[in-house]
Image: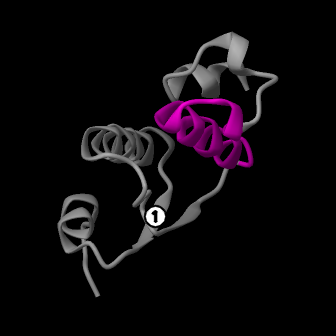
Amino acid sequence: MLELLHKTGLQPEHYNRYPHELVAASGNGLLIARALALGPSFMCVTRVFPALDVSVQAQVLNLLNELKTAFGFTAIFISHDLSVIRYMSDRIA
């Protein structure tokens, strides 16, 4: 789990924290690390963090793109923000 925390941009001291105890980007990183701990081959991401400001949202999306490649999982993104979908997707339906 510590390796996953590192890969999602978190520190070892975040290990015993809950997502709501962290700032937005770190909280999302922790949620992503928890999901990756299960070794998924598929991940569904809905409402791609609409409450985050644009720069934090970009950090999280960049992280997800890096992790998709590093861990080899497929992701489906469900959103009404077409610019996010275009950035994140290989194929759009």
Q: Residue at x 56, y 63 (%)?
A: 43
Which residue is disc 1 drawn over? 75
Residue 47: percent from the left, percent from the top?
45, 69
Q: Residue at x 34, y 39 (%)?
A: 56
Q: Is residue 78 left or right of residue 3?
A: left
- For the record, the magenta segment spans 19-38
Residue 16: percent from the left, percent from the top?
82, 23
Q: Secondary structure at mark 1?
A: strand
Q: Is residue 48 left or right of residue 91?
A: right
In the rendered image, which quarter is residue 37 located in? Answer: top right
**What colour scheme was applied to this rendering of the protein?**
one colour
Residue 91: percent from the left, percent from the top?
25, 75
In the rendered image, which quarter is residue 80 located in? Answer: bottom left
**Is 34 within the magenta?**
yes
Query: The C terminus appears in which quarter of the rendering?
Result: bottom left
Mainly helix, strand or loop, the magenta region?
A: helix
Amino acid carrying mark 1 in the image: Ala
Q: Residue at x 42, y 62 (%)?
A: 48
**Is 32 within the magenta?**
yes
Residue 70: percent from the left, percent from the top?
44, 38
Q: Residue at x 44, y 41 (%)?
A: 67
